[in-house]
Image (cartoon, rainbow, N blue to C red):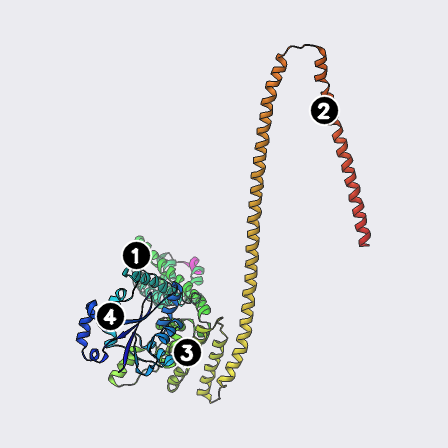
Amino acid sequence: MVLLHVLFEHAAGYALFAVREVEEIGLLLPQVEESVLTLGKFHNVVKLVAFSPFRSAQSALENMNAVSEGVLHEDLRLLLDTALPPKRKKVLLGVGDAKMGAAVLEELGVQCQTGGVVAELMRGIRLHFPALVRGLTAQSAAKAQLGLGHSYSRAKVKFNVHRVDNMIIQSISLLDQLDKDINTFSMRVREWYGYHFPELIKIVPENSMYCRVAKFIGNRRELSEESLEGLEEIVMDSAKAQAILEASRSSMGMDISPLDLINIESFSRRVISLSDYRKGLQEYLRSKMSQVAPSLSALIGEVVGARLISHAGSLTNLAKYPASTVQILGAEKALFRALKTRGNTPKYGLIFHSTFIGRAAAKNKGRISRYLANKCTIASRIDCFSEVPTSVFGDKLREQVEERLAFYETGEPPRKNLEVMKEAVVEASEVVAEVKRRQEKKEKKRKKREKRRLEALAAAAEEAAENSVMETEENDVGAKKKKKKKKQQPEESEAEAEPEENGVEEEEEEEPLPKKKRKVVVEPEEEEEEEKKKKKKKKKKAVAQDSEED
């Protein structure tokens, strides 16, 4: 009889349950559903065989990442090796994910089952898990789930921080939205200002330039030869500026009030600012693509590459797609319509906007789109999984596509892929070495700046400490002087108050005063002699050094 075991992954650890009476449970599914709801009946169905708790939050996060990716972690392998019966042929393991089942079958040779009875049993285990494991309360299980959920979400958000492809997705979406909005607003300006100057629409067909010209002209009756230079700067063509001036003199448009002109100019100013912002956003997208996916942007262009990444969801998802999926990415509706009506499937999707397909002949568009999708897949995988992404591989792949186009037109055979990739690897290694050398230089400079900053802070702290010590010493000296003065004042008053008994005492008191004066006179002479001795020593040292140098 086959022994059914169920593997359950919880935030607290892995649990392995043995299921009793497999054959009856397999036949009586409604009874299984009923027994799941009550703990007493469910105890008769499953029995805990082994429970392996996670050692730490970091270990739990590593195990959950492995489970989500369908990889067999070492902790799970140890549990299954020790807890499952030795006769593996008679064991059937129930798992919740088919990827995990395939990994267990490949590495341990244990047959796995998903869905059906296993799903019902897992529902019951999830419901009664704190009661099935000893020492685990519902409160601690909820805390473990909350902590692991937060750390897992944080790790997913922080995944691939330096390859910020989500910024590219938002940028290309905003770029498309801005194109639609600028087009709509420009048409509104054309219609609004066309009542006053209808001939301008045919002379200036470009949207942002039309808004600039309309804002510059204002009232067409005030347009004169003096404003011709300003018009030339905007339209970048002297003949077109002259045509605008002549058309304004013979225009069929109606007169317009100053208030209406103010509103039109204000709206035109907004449209111009939007178009300027769109140019800046395109530059930002170009710089981001050169950082995140340089090979893909060098091969197919920044905008088309960003649209592919946005449609796939991320650069990692795009790297996982096969070339056949990349070829029709963006043409899903046409594909499913063709499958439904049994018509011809589409040959290209978003990659149609690249220049290669437009340059190819009609009979070669499908072939070149297939070849281009293949190269785009290679470029996206290089960008996604290389440590230091460079545009070397993208340039080489672009050369290959150019050679293939020439082969379709002239029949000239292209180079082999192996030769091109060898050249690319050599060039890329040189570029990567140069980039790493620059990064090391920057890191050294940063460390030096940090060291200088810390030294300056330490010196400032020492100066502050010395100043504080000096201030305290000065305060102490001042306090001592004050105390001495206070002590001397009572002594002097007592001396004055005492009667003079005889002249001998006065002489004894007056005798020490000349001695103090002598000391004061003697001290400067000694200091001068010491200074002379020091100068002589310095001269002798200087003479000795000069003789040594000679």
Identify the residue under disc 1: 256
Mark 2–mark 3 Cα distance, whole angstroms, equals 100 Å
Mark 3–mark 4 Cα distance, whole angstroms, equals 41 Å
Mark 2–mark 4 Cα distance, whole angstroms, equals 105 Å
Mark 4–mark 1 Cα distance, whole angstroms, equals 74 Å
Kindly identify the amino acid type of the residue bearing the numbered disc 3: Thr
Kindly identify the amino acid type of the residue bearing the numbered disc 4: Arg
- Foreground: 496 or 175? 496
Q: Nearer the viewer, mark 3 or mark 1?
A: 3
Label 2 near label 1: C-beta < 8 Å? no
The image position of residue 289, as x and y in percent, is 44, 69
Label 3 sits on a secondary structure element that is: helix
Identify the residue under disc 4: 123
Q: Nearer the viewer, mark 2 or mark 4?
A: 4
- Foreground: 418 or 38? 38
Kindly identify the amino acid type of the residue bearing the numbered disc 1: Ile
Of label 3 and label 1, which has the lower sequence position?
1
- Foreground: 366 or 79? 79
Q: Please give the name of the residue rendered at 56% of the width and 56% of the height, measured from the top-left corner.
A: 449
Magenta range is 224-228
Mark sitting on residue 135:
none
Identify the residue under disc 2: 516
The image position of residue 102, as x and y in percent, is 34, 79
Q: Is residue 160 above or below residue 102?
A: above
